[in-house]
Image: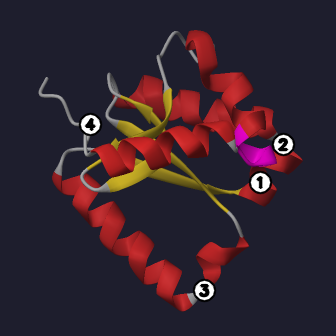
């Protein structure tokens, strides 16, 4: 499988900063994805791909998990996310989105949904 990560120094630096400054929702879901806790699938967080940074990425399943805060409801953000998802899809990456509210309310249910996608999609 060809490497999909974007090694642009600027993006790598930004991704590193984002890993240090996680949102509460990112912290909650990361506790369920890290160390192969989700069905043995390895996830990385804040991964640069195709000029974008995805919140969580499972290379083996070609799955990006995105957590969306309220700002993603803005019309410009909706269009940006649509274009971004299209670029990732062209690279063979599935994108699943959850609102921060969903994750904060029931992170275990979100993790179960991710696991279902991983096991049904591999």
* Distance CA(mark 4)–CA(mark 2): 30 Å
Q: Residue drawn at (67%, 30%), measured in percent from left and top?
A: 30
Q: CB of mark 1 within 8 Å of CB of mark 2? A: yes
Whichever of labels 3 and 2 marks the residue nearer the N terminus, that label is 3
Q: Give whichever of 93, 113 is nearer the camera.
A: 93
Vertical comparison of 40 with 55: above or below: above
Q: Residue under label 2, please give it.
A: 106
Q: Residue 116's x, y, as percent?
A: 54, 30
Q: Residue under label 1, please give it.
A: 102
SS for tag 2? loop
Q: Is residue 120 left or right of residue 122?
A: right
Whichever of labels 3 and 4 marks the residue nearer the N terminus, that label is 4
Where is the N terminus found, in terms of image quarters?
Answer: top left
Q: Which residues are magenta?
A: 22-26
* Distance CA(mark 3)–CA(mark 2): 24 Å
* Distance CA(mark 3)–CA(mark 4): 28 Å
Q: Residue under label 3, please give it.
A: 74
Q: Residue under label 4, please give it.
A: 5
Q: Dot 1, how many residues are within 10 Å of its Cα: few (below 14), some (14-19), or many (20+)?
A: some
Q: Dot 4, how many residues are within 10 Å of its Cα: few (below 14), some (14-19), or many (20+)?
A: some
Quarter of the rendering containing residue 87? bottom left
Question: Is residue 94 something one can see in this rendering?
Answer: no
* Distance CA(mark 1)–CA(mark 4): 28 Å
Give the residue at the far left of this rendering.
2
Which circle marks residue 20 in the picture? none
């Amino acid at each position: 499988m060809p490497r999909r990560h974007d090694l642009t120094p600027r993006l790598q630096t930004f991704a590193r900063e984002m890993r240090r400054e996680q949102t509460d929702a990112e912290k909650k879901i990361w506790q369920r994805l890290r160390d192969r806790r989700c069905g043995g699938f390895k996830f990385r967080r804040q991964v640069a791909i195709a000029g974008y940074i995805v919140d969580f990425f499972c290379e083996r399943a070609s799955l990006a998990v995105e957590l969306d805060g309220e700002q993603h409801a803005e019309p410009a953000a909706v269009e940006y996310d649509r274009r971004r998802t299209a670029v990732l899809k062209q690279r063979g990456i599935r994108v699943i989105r959850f609102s921060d509210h969903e994750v904060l309310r029931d992170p275990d249910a979100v993790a179960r949904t991710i696991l279902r996608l991983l096991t049904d999609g591999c």
